[in-house]
Image (cartoon, rainbow, N blue to C red):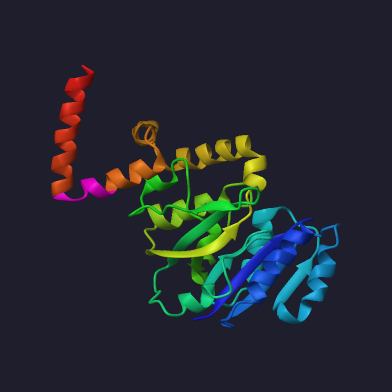
């Protein structure tokens, strides 16, 4: 199985170097590496020239934003699966792709976990994945994009929506998973070590607005309100609840517990 690793970058020279080094040090060589730089002015192009022999394809020229750059990368990709490891993020260790080669991976979308590291405390945590996927997964949150591998053909008729600046990847997940019901495989492997802050954090208000916009395009207001009620629980508790109620014994115990709690708070 061959992977296309696509990295987009703009004025993040040191982050770009870190990402490149995490790719080229992979013990498995079954990948192609594509870098799309948006005409950076900080010397990023010099970094690309430095690693020219280890990058399959790269370009440094002005573009129209992150998702425009990702779509440019998709056009150049020839792998079975595409991964978007943007500048500043990196593979968790040098054996990520090697470990993937030992697994039976056939789904349209393969989702691993991110590791979020606090550089100050040197402590971190890995993403909690849901036990199953539904629209509930995407009401407020999404899946770890840098730790996802997509079959290349998924993008043939539906590239990333370039009218969205921050959540086109969320819209793509919803379209492919919830609408088209593409197959998904959740794996426990940690794929990516993420930068603590990124464009979505820096522009959080716009991210929330765009997220609400794409959800409203799919669901009527009543359904959104039902999902919002579930989201009064924290994400971890909600995922545990969903897992429990899928089993007969779990449903009985939860029903019994709710009856007791209801009596106590009356």
Q: Is residue 248 above or below residue 255?
A: below
Q: Is residue 250 above or below residue 148?
A: above
Q: Nearer the viewer, residue 70 or 48?
A: 48
Q: Would you identify the image quadrant in which residue 76 lies? A: bottom right
- Taking the spot 16% from the left edge, 36% from the top edge, the residue there is 255
Q: Residue furthest top?
A: 266
The answer to whether residue 59 is left or right of residue 194 is right
Q: Is residue 54 above or below residue 191?
A: below
Q: Position of residue 35 (x, y in %)?
A: 70, 68
Q: Main secondary structure of the magenta part?
A: helix
- Whether residue 157 is visible to the viewer of this picture, yes or no, is no
Q: Position of residue 112 (x, y in %)?
A: 46, 62
Q: Nearer the viewer, residue 55 or 217?
A: 55
Q: Position of residue 21 (x, y in %)?
A: 69, 71
Task: Magenta stretch: give its range.
Answer: 243-248
Q: Would you identify the image quadrant in which residue 131 lies? A: bottom left
- Taking the spot 36% from the left edge, 50% from the top edge, the residue there is 134
| Quadrant where the C terminus is found in the figure | top left
Q: Nearer the viewer, residue 148 or 65?
A: 148
Q: Is residue 122 above or below residue 90?
A: above
Q: Position of residue 20 (x, y in %)?
A: 70, 69
Figure disc tally: 0
- Taking the spot 47% from the left edge, 45% from the top edge, the residue there is 141
- Taking the spot 58% from the left edge, 81% from the top edge, the residue there is 27
- Whether residue 12 is visible to the viewer of this picture, yes or no, is yes
Q: Is residue 196 magenta?
A: no
Q: Would you identify the image quadrant in which residue 66 lies? A: bottom right
The answer to whether residue 36 is left or right of residue 240 is right
């Amino acid at each position: 199985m061959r992977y296309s690793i696509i990295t987009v970058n703009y004025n993040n020279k040191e982050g770009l170097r870190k990402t490149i080094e995490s790719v080229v040090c992979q013990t498995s060589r079954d990948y192609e590496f594509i870098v799309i730089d948006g005409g950076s002015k900080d010397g990023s192009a010099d970094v690309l020239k430095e690693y020219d022999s280890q990058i399959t394809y790269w370009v440094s020229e002005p573009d129209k934003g992150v998702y425009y750059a990702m779509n440019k990368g998709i056009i150049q990709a020839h792998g079975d699966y595409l991964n978007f490891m943007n500048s500043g993020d990196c593979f968790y260790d040098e054996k990520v792709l090697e470990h993937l080669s030992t697994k039976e991976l056939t789904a349209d979308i393969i989702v691993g976990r991110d590791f979020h590291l606090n550089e100050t405390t040197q402590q971190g945590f890995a993403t909690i994945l849901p036990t199953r996927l539904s629209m509930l997964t995407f009401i407020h949150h999404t899946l770890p994009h840098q730790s996802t591998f997509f079959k290349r053909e998924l993008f043939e008729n539906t590239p990333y929506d370039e009218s969205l600046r921050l959540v086109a990847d969320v819209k793509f997940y919803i379209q492919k998973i919830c609408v088209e019901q593409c197959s998904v495989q959740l794996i426990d492997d940690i794929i990516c070590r993420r930068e603590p802050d990124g464009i979505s954090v820096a522009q959080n208000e716009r991210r929330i607005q765009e997220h609400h916009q794409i959800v409203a395009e799919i669901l009527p207001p009543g359904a959104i309100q039902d999902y919002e009620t579930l989201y009064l629980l924290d994400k971890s508790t909600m995922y545990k609840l969903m897992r429990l109620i899928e089993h007969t014994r779990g449903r009985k115990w939860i029903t019994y517990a709710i009856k007791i709690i209801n009596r106590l708070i009356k």
